[in-house]
Image (spheres, rainbow, N blue to C red):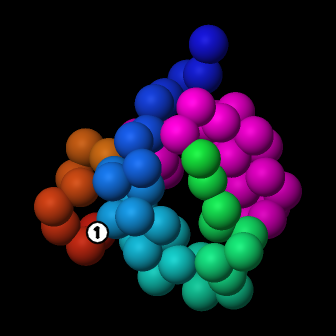
Amino acid sequence: MPAITISDNDWKRVKIKLKRKYNHLNDEQLQYTAGQEDQLIERLAGLVNRDKDYVIFTLKKALVNIDNNRL
């Protein structure tokens, strides 16, 4: 079971936040399909050179504050 669940609608907003924080990431690297959270977390961990726990923390923070631009 994944550590978090992200809907397609939420992902659109989270992706924008991630691109602002990590401006080297592109749309292709941030491809995501609902239900594939574990693959997303592993991929992001490699792309931003952080561990999975940090990526999960960052994604949860983005989801909690989905209506603002902060990450």
Does any portion of residue 63 appear in the rendered image?
A: yes
Q: Residue reaching furthest left?
A: 67
The residue nearer to you, when weighing 55 against 42, is 42
What's the magenta region? 34-60
Residue type at the position of mark 1: Arg
Q: Left or right: where does residue 27 sit relative to residue 64?
A: right
Read off the residue under disc 1. Answer: 70
How crowded pointer 1 is (Cα within 10 Å; few <14, some 14-19, many 20+) is rated as few
Residue 47 position in % (x across, y down): 79, 65
Q: Left or right: where does residue 56 sit relative to residue 9?
A: right
Residue 1 position in % (x across, y down): 62, 13
Q: Is residue 67 above or below residue 64?
A: below
Residue 10 position in % (x across, y down): 34, 52
- Which quadrant of the figure has residue 51? top right
Q: Residue reaching furthest bottom?
A: 23
Residue 58 shown in magenta: yes
Secondary structure of the residue carrying tag 1 is: loop
The residue nearer to you, when weighing 54 against 66, is 66
Does any portion of residue 54 appear in the rendered image?
A: no
